[in-house]
Amino acid sequence: QVRLVESGGGIVQAGDSLTLSCAAIGRTFSNYSIDWFRQAPGKDLEKVATINWNGGNARYQDSLKGRFTIAKDNDKNTVALQIHSLKPEDSATYYCGARPIWGVKYDYWGQGTQVTVSS
């Protein structure tokens, strides 16, 4: 079964760093982009970062540049999202989605991983 599985969430302190992982199960996603999103309670889904499956073309939401790093781990078939200097407003459920590089429709979504940042 083809799916994406997020992991790495938890309860952390403000100022800490955290690495989330999006594992691709059942296939590789050549010619796909993997996008990280987050959704806080009562708020809209927000795109955080994106990267092509070959590891290129990493881009970030402008307001998050510098604290977020997205990277492809070829050995583990995963896409990691590192978050530095965590803030309480980073608390959200983080999701990864896979879409064709030139498409806008997501073919696969993960179930999400919860991040809670305490002040």
Image (spheres, rainbow, N blue to C red):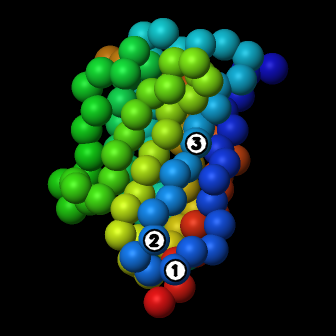
Judged from this view, the residue extending furthest toward the left is 62
Q: CA distance from mark 1 to mark 3?
A: 19 Å
Residue nearest the viewer, comparing 114 with 102: 114
Q: Nearer the viewer, residue 37 or 58?
A: 58
Q: Is residue 70 visible?
A: yes
CB of mark 2 within 8 Å of CB of mark 3?
no
Q: Which numbered tag is attached to residue 77?
A: none
Q: In this figure, which residue is indicated by the disc labeled 3? A: 21
Q: Tell me the tag on residue 16.
A: 2
Q: CA distance from mark 2 to mark 3?
A: 17 Å
Residue count near mark 1 (Cα–Cα under 10 Å), binned few <14, some 14–19, many ≥20: some
Circle 3 Cα neighbour tier, 10 Å, few/some/many (<14 / 14–19 / ≥20): many
Which of disc 3 and disc 2 is earlier in sequence?
2
Are the residues flagged by discs 1 and 2 in contact, CB closer than 8 Å? yes
Disc nearest the viewer among 1 and 3: 1
Residue count near mark 2 (Cα–Cα under 10 Å), binned few <14, some 14–19, many ≥20? few
**Picture coordinates of residue 32, whole percent (x, y):** 45, 18
Question: From mark 1 to mark 2, how far is it between C-alphas?
Answer: 6 Å
Asked if disc 1 and disc 3 are in contact, CB closer than 8 Å, the reply is no
| Label 2 element class | loop
Q: Quadrant of residue 75?
A: top right
**Residue 93 higher or lower than 26, as above or below:** below
> On screen, 33 above or below 81?
above
Rendered image: mark on residue 13:
1
Looking at numbered disc 2 in the image, what kind of residue is underneath it? Asp
Q: Residue at x 57, y 29 (%)?
A: 78
Which element type, helix, strand or loop, lies under badge 1?
Answer: strand
Q: Position of residue 8 (x, y in %)?
A: 63, 53
Residue type at the position of mark 3? Ser
